[in-house]
Image (cartoon, rainbow, N blue to C red):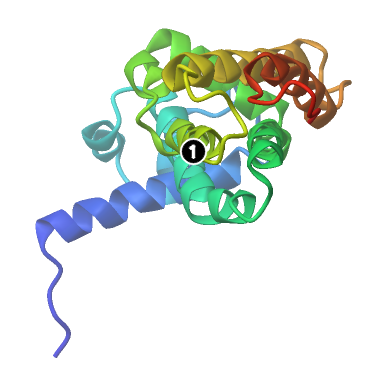
Amino acid sequence: MEKKQTRKEQALQTRSNILTVCTGLLREHTFDELSISMICREADISVGAFYHHFKTKSDIIVELYRDVDDVFVNDILPVCRQLPPLEAILQYLCEQCGYAETMGIDSIKNVYKAQIDNGNTFFASNARGLPDGLRCLLQRAVRECCLKTDTDIEKLLEDLLIMSRGVIYYWCIRNGEINVRDYIYHMAEGYLQAYIANPSISL
């Protein structure tokens, strides 16, 4: 006999279904075109059920962006760890900007809107998977004497994230007409020169 789902399991399944439906709809519609009634119709749930899981439509974007952390922790960080310490940092930032291309301009624009409107605590946290992965790479570079031993890792982490987010923002307002990977690679490469333990060694 099949085990009956608990209410918690049913709730998690419904939430997951809503996110899956939204992911599919966002491939065919802009975020502004997407309505809660459209989501509910595709997910076969009531409007009340939607609001039980999400306060606003923007909450969907915040939740979908949490998946980015999982990708960076489980897929991208392990690959970057195989690279030399400084190159690993640069490639990690390239992947962050490249992931924006994968999500698409419309989705990223709405990620930024969601950050401003109601997701500041989540997006600004450097304890999340993506920032924490970069922190690990910076710590490794200091440990292996590629960066100066007195490097303020938290400050450098913040600076690099401001830089990468700025490149993504610029990519959005240029409607995708720039190569985000090239931009962040060369900007971060130049910035890291000030932190290199042996100035005679270039990146």
* Residue 181 figure quarter: top right
* In this view, 142 is above or below 75: above
Where is residue 185 drawn, in percent x and y? 77, 27
Disc 1 crowd rating (10 Å Cα; few below 14, some 14-19, many 20+) is: few
* In this view, 27 is above or below 79: above
Q: Is residue 10 left or right of residue 170?
A: left
Where is residue 128 drawn, in percent x and y? 38, 33
Label 1 sits on a secondary structure element that is: helix
Label tally: 1
* In this view, 111 is above or below 20: above
Q: Quadrant of the N terminus?
A: bottom left
- Residue at the spot of label 1: 143
Q: Residue at x 58, y 47 (%)?
A: 24
Q: Which is more toward the observer, 47 or 129?
A: 129
Q: Residue at x 75, y 23 (%)?
A: 189
Q: Residue at x 45, y 9 (%)?
A: 116
Q: Which is more toward the observer, 87 or 162?
A: 87
